[in-house]
Amino acid sequence: MDLIFQGWPWYVAGPLIALIMFLLIFMGKQFGMSSNLRTLCTMCGADKSAGFFDFNWRAQKWNLVVIVGAAIGGFIAMNFLTVDPAVTIHPDTVANLNELGFSSAGEAYLPDELYGIDALTDLKALSILIIGGFLIGFGARWAGGCTSGHAISGLSNLQLPSLIAVVGFFIGGLFMIHVLFPLIF
């Protein structure tokens, strides 16, 4: 039982992800979380106002089940299968984040300074979340998929656009953490 309460090493989790991707490829499916937003918009009638949303959303119902399963699985894992909810972060990184004003670094998955209830009244925190959310949503759509879609599904299918997108994600991440992050915080 201790096995399920601990994080799984890469040599267990990685092959399990590969097995799932093999099964999806075998069934002719492509996994991606951000594509569910398009499906949900179409289900709500967006296909009547934009051609982008005019597709057979019923063929993507299985992907909606994946996102519901991920949410339920995450809830169960966090609330019933986690002994210590603190995220494991290298002490040097915790010290750097503390210097930038993130006092909850190493204690929570999401920093209270951005995701706590007090952040709802902080203009800077709200601006960061709204602008960041827009950029992530726009970027995922512009790139034809999000990080999970390109890095897990696209690379599993040996798609060159996914390789280019993943390289771009890493370059953007490095630029964010080394250039923009110190300027914002």
Image (cartoon, rainbow, N blue to C red):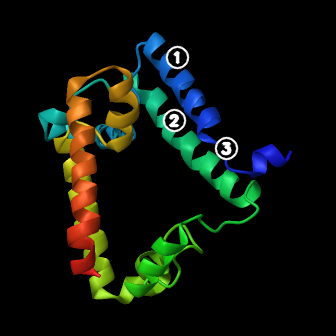
Residue 116 screen position, x and y as percent:
48, 80
Whether tag 3 and tag 2 are in contact, CB under 8 A, the answer is no
First of labels 3, 2 by sequence position = 3
18 shown above or below 131: above
Image location of residue 88, percent across then percent down: 59, 64
Task: Single out the mark in the foreground, 3 or 1.
Answer: 3
**Residue at which label 2 appears:** 66
Q: Secondary structure at mark 2?
A: helix
At label 2, counting other C-alpha atoms closer than 10 Å, the crowd grade (few under 14, some 14-19, many 20 or more) is some
Vertical position of residue 72 compared to residue 62: above or below: below
Mark 2 to mark 1 CA distance (whole Å): 14 Å
User: Closer to us: mark 3 or mark 2?
Assistant: 3
Horizontal side, residue 48 vs residue 154: left or right:
left
Residue holding disc 3: 8
Closer to the chain start, of discs 3 and 1, is 3
- Residue sitting farthest toward the top: 26
Residue for point 73% across, 58% down: 82
Query: Residue visible at 49% across and 41% down?
Result: 67
Residue in front for this viewpoint, 78 or 63 = 78
Per the rendering, the mark at residue 161 is none
Quarter holding the N terminus? top right
Residue type at mark 1 is Leu
Rounded to the nearest whole Å, what is the CA distance between mark 3 and mark 2?
Answer: 21 Å
